[in-house]
Amino acid sequence: MKYIVYILKSERDGGIYIGHTEDLSLAMAEHEAGAKRGTKYRLPMQLVHKESVKSFKQVKMKEQYWLSREGVKEIETMIGPLPKKKGK
């Protein structure tokens, strides 16, 4: 089975959403409809990165990487600075 790990950027608040799916078109439609948790109030969202992985284990590893300090730095290299989290 093939999975896609993807990163969306909110055009409203500049924040990112990291997710995975087997069907990117369906996932994007769900995001645009506000059906995906974590993006409803952050629409519109723009796809800024996607990559295919072969296993669910790789999905989890990629998601953890993108959430790490190193991964966030790489995301900022691709799309520019991310907004600072409240309280930091």
Image: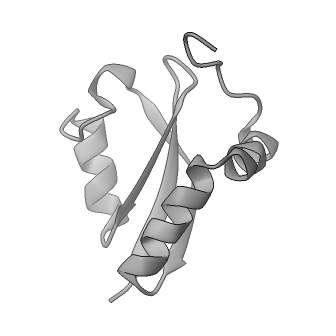
Residue 76 image offset from top left, x and y in percent:
75, 39
Give the position of the C terminus as an image quadrant: top right
**Quadrant (top left, top right, bottom left, bottom right) of the N terminus:** bottom left
Q: Is residue 66 above or below residue 86?
A: below
Picture quadrant of residue 62: bottom right
Q: Is residue 22 above or below residue 67?
A: below
Counting from the top left corner in percent of width and height, residue 71 is at 69, 52
Foreground: 61 or 51? 61
- Coloring basis for residues: one colour
Q: Nearer the viewer, residue 60 or 22?
A: 60
In the displayed structure, 87 sits above or below 32; it is: above
Q: Which residue is drawn at 52% across and 69% down?
A: 61
Quick one: which residue is furthest to the front in this view?
87
View extreme (top): residue: 87
Q: Picture quarter containing residue 19? A: bottom left
Q: Position of residue 63 (x, y in %)?
A: 50, 59
The spot of residue 44 in percent (x, y) is 41, 28
Q: Going by the image, does 9 lie left or right of 57?
A: right
Residue 55 quadrant: bottom left
Which residue lies most toward the left here?
35
Q: Which residue is drawn at 38% across and 25% down?
A: 43
Whether residue 58 sits left or right of residue 42 in the image: it is right
Residue at image position (42%, 79%) is: 57
Q: Residue furthest right?
A: 77
